[in-house]
């Protein structure tokens, strides 16, 4: 998916285009918020991370910042995402307890 998306971006915008000219703290915060909000809307965080990775041209020091953003946004995104496996299993478990409690 990442290779296909980066090829599409290169074909549409040219090979010199990148989302950010550099990837520092402000860009990391914007990326974190965007991935987390998309997870809150129901998109799995790995999709946002893959899309972001395919349109960034990261230098050596920026790769560490991106890795931290990816890890933290994945952790928060799976916690707040309504369709994540964790939340779906908790909803099912709590619904089962509520049903058995109501029957008594």
Image (cartoon, rainbow, N blue to C red):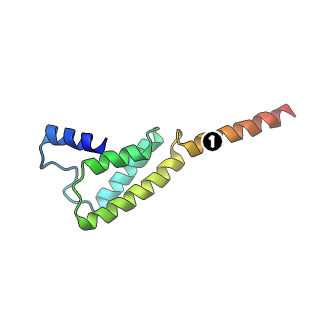
Q: Is residue 10 above or below residue 73?
A: above
Of 49 and 28, nearer the camera is 49
Q: Position of residue 3 (x, y in %)?
A: 26, 44
Side of 84 where 90 appears, left or right: right
What's the residue at 87%, 34% (across, down)?
104
Q: Position of residue 44 (x, y in %)?
A: 44, 42
Q: How many marks?
A: 1
Name the residue that disc number 1 marks: 89
Q: Residues within 10 Å of mark 1 (few under 14, many from 20)?
A: few
Question: Which residue lies most toward the right here?
Answer: 104
Residue at the image point whose x is 70% and y is 41% from the top = 94
Q: Nearer the viewer, residue 4 or 93?
A: 4
Q: Is residue 84 left or right of residue 19?
A: right
Q: Is residue 99 above or below residue 53?
A: above
Residue at 36%, 60% in the rendered image: 67
Position of 57 with respect to 16 (left or right) is right
Disc 1 is placed on an element classified as: helix
């Amino acid at each position: 998916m990442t290779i296909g998306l980066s090829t599409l971006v290169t074909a549409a915008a040219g090979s010199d285009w990148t989302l950010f000219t550099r990837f520092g703290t402000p860009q990391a915060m914007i990326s974190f918020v965007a991935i987390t909000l998309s997870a809150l809307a129901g998109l799995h965080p790995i999709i946002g991370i893959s899309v972001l990775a395919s349109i960034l041209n990261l230098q050596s020091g920026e790769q560490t910042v991106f890795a931290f953003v990816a890890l933290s946004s994945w952790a928060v995104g799976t916690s707040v995402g309504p369709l994540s496996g964790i939340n779906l299993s908790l909803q099912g478990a709590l619904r089962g307890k509520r049903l058995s409690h109501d029957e008594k």
